[in-house]
Amino acid sequence: MKGKANPPAHFLTLCLALFMVSGRSLPLHAAEPAPKLQIEYRGQTLQGRVALHNARFCWFEQPDGRLDFLTMSEVQHYKILSPSFSPLSVRQMADQLRQVAGREREVATSGPYVVVARQGLATPVAQALHQVYRELVVYCGARHLKLSAPPFPLVATVWENRQAFDEACQAEKVPIRATLRGFYSRLSNRVMLYEEAGQAIDDTVMHEAVHQIAFNCGLHARTGQTPTWILEGLATSLESPEMRRSGSGTTAAERLNRSRLTWFRERQNLRSVGWLRELVESNKPFQARPLDAYAESWAATFYLLERRPIDLRRYLTALEQPDWDQETQSPEERLAMFSHYFGQNLRLLEREVERDLTAFP
């Protein structure tokens, strides 16, 4: 079959055969065997492997880590290029990016990171990101949230100005907002940000770096249905250097994200009863009252990290179930899953979170 184009009906047959052999219904890891394919899809030629599929849809992984959500019936042809798929190495990714970076920009590597930025900036950003990664491995390992090695190189691009960043947003189909300083795309698997007043390494970098690590190292599944509150709750908890660098001798007070705690406390008298239930049931609070939603997500996640890390790990694992229709779960489904791991009495849990956080000096 190698080198021979096949009709789309046979593509589903191939996918079914692959997954019957592997016996998996969850995404493959990069180290697991799978053939490298070439497919024709909507006028594009893509190379990679089937990460996950059902009868209608397919998550297709490319060697650089890009993830595509494909409609099976629109795969026009496929052929097997080799019996095993291999992600690009850090060196291969760096060489690939150097070909398109241009003379004014450089590509630097550190550990699993490949960073594209202006001359003189790429290396310090790569080193800073690598340090965040090392800190999170230690922190999460101590809280039953063991991180796996990233299957693909972790790529970050620092644009020199807002205009270049906005163009990158358009290319990644990310809505442009005046307050947006950076983002992580689970589809391209890359972090994008820009320098502001000559500053590139700041809280935005750390926040997006946490998202990228979480999606690549086993806390979130890129094909899953992870609610916004836990995505942002983990990122706002772990963006804090005090949290990441906490050793066994530190106290919970030393691990706080003080800016999030301040906002959470200042809004205490304005916060409605049932705020935790609202976060769990839908992502609407992030549209209606984003600053409150970020602070509340941090508060709930910080509490679970400190008090119930094993339950949190089990909940995160359950969220790895694939998102086939690219639609969020119903409020009832989200609430039922949360309650299964953290209990039926959300009001009691809400009061425990509030009590813990008001007790800190």
Image: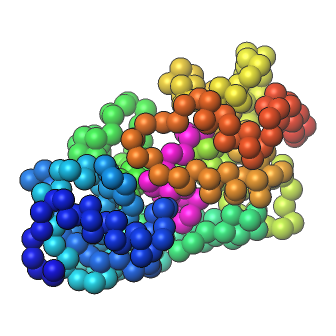
Q: How is the image coloured?
A: rainbow
Which region is colored magenta?
212-229
Indicate yes or no whether the magenta region holds residue 346.
no
The vertical placement of 46 against 291, above or below, is below
Q: Main secondary structure of the magenta part?
A: loop
Image spot of residue 40 (x, y percent): 13, 60
In percent of the image, x 39 and y 61: which residue is there? 52
Decide if residue 139 is on the left or right side of residue 5.
right
Q: Is residue 84 left or right of residue 304?
A: left
Image quadrant in which you'd find residue 120: bottom left
Say which residue appears at 40% left-offset and 46% top-offset. Answer: 324
**260 relative to 76, above or below:** above
Magenta span includes 213? yes
**Which residue is nearer to you in this view: 42 or 66?**
42
Q: Percent position (x, y) of residue 251? A: 86, 56
Query: Residue 76 placed where, x, y %?
Result: 12, 57
Q: Residue at x 48, y 36 (%)?
A: 328
Q: Is residue 243 visible?
A: yes
Does the image show residue 124? no
Residue 70 percent coordinates (x, y) = 27, 52
Residue at the image position 25 percent from the left and 53 percent from the top: 72
- In this picture, is 272 found above or below 253? above
Q: Quadrant of the C terminus?
A: top right
Q: Quadrant of residue 86?
A: bottom left
Q: Where is the N terminus found, in terms of image quarters?
A: bottom left
Q: How many marks?
A: 0
